[in-house]
Image: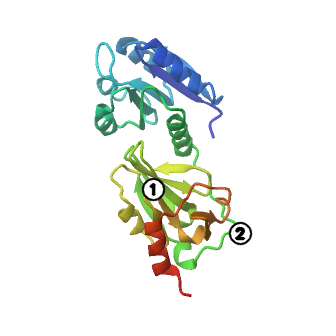
Amino acid sequence: MADFFKVAIIDDERDSANALIAQLKRYPRFHIEGVAENATSGIEMLKKVMPDLLFLDVELPEMYGMELLSELDNEIKDNMRVVFYTAHDKYMINALRNSAFDFLLKPIDRKEFEIVISRFLLDNETKPVVIEKIPVASSSKESSFMVILPTGEMRMVKTAEVGFFRYVSERKIWEAALVSGYSVALRRNVSAEFLCSFNKNFVQVHQSYIVNMDFLVMIHDNYCVLYPPFDNCKEVVVSRKYKKNLLEQFCIF
């Protein structure tokens, strides 16, 4: 486990860079090693700093951020994660195609930034998952499936690790809430039907939520009450449409 992570920022807008620095100061393990205002100085900085995480503005005076990365090619370390950010979401697809770890829109939303940091930590510090005092059916306990992250990387996820999936409408992606406390963002074209097809215990209860039935204790006031470690989770709501499906599928009395 790394004690700290080196961060670099390339952005020609001073106010935007300062706002990003302010967000990063909330995370003491992330050390800002360099800030550049243009592509030329940015390339030199990256060669010197060799950061773990780079926040890169899409539109720079001399070139696009994607072009900057292509010029570096193999001169920077392979495990550097790149987060593109811009005021224009039209660049999102190109950013992801150019091996971006993630993408942020200006002005940077605090919650969105927290998701990026959580994903980065999960990617670098995957912890062994210990599940205790959770009744898990034997049919799903040993099963696992592979998800493709927005970075293109493949990660194995055990069914027993997933408490529920949530849909993040602002980013148009599904996230898996894991027993480790982390959330794994899935590929953008993953649908609810696709997730539910992996395992019969993944059941949609709302347009924005899919629950692992092994973690469901009860439904109270249209909210899912879940087993630990999700027992303090108050967000998983059950809509009328999906409640009817639940009753038809699972109610035997």
Looking at the rendered structure, the kind of residue marked 1 is Ser
Please, what secondary structure does the residue beneath circle 2 have?
loop
Looking at the rendered structure, the kind of residue marked 2 is Lys
Of residues 41 and 205, the one nearer the viewer is 205
Task: Identify the residue at horizontal 50%, vertical 37% (top origin).
Answer: 112
Of residues 146 and 74, the one nearer the viewer is 146
| Mark 1 or mark 2: whose residue is earlier in sequence | 2
Residue 44 image point, x, y percent: 41, 15
Q: Label 1, on which residue?
A: 208
Residue 219 image point, x, y percent: 60, 69
Task: Identify the residue at horizontal 36%, vertical 58% (top origin).
Answer: 191
Local packing at callout 1 (Cα closer than 10 Å; few below 14, some 14-19, many 20+) is some
Task: Identify the residue at horizontal 50%, vertical 60% (top origin).
Answer: 157
Question: Looking at the rendered structure, which numbered label has been put on residue 141?
Answer: none
Please, what secondary structure does the residue beneath circle 1 have?
loop
Does residue 200 appear in this view?
no
Asked if residue 77 lies left or right of residue 133, the reply is left
Task: Identify the residue at horizontal 71%, vertical 69% (top origin).
Answer: 133
Local packing at callout 2 (Cα closer than 10 Å; few below 14, some 14-19, many 20+) is few
In the rendered view, tell whether residue 120 sits above or below residue 108.
below
Where, by quadrant of the figure, is residue 141 drawn? bottom right
Residue 202 image point, x, y percent: 47, 68
In the rendered view, tell whether residue 97 sits above or below residue 165.
above
Does residue 36 appear in this view?
yes
Quadrant in the picture for the C terminus: bottom right
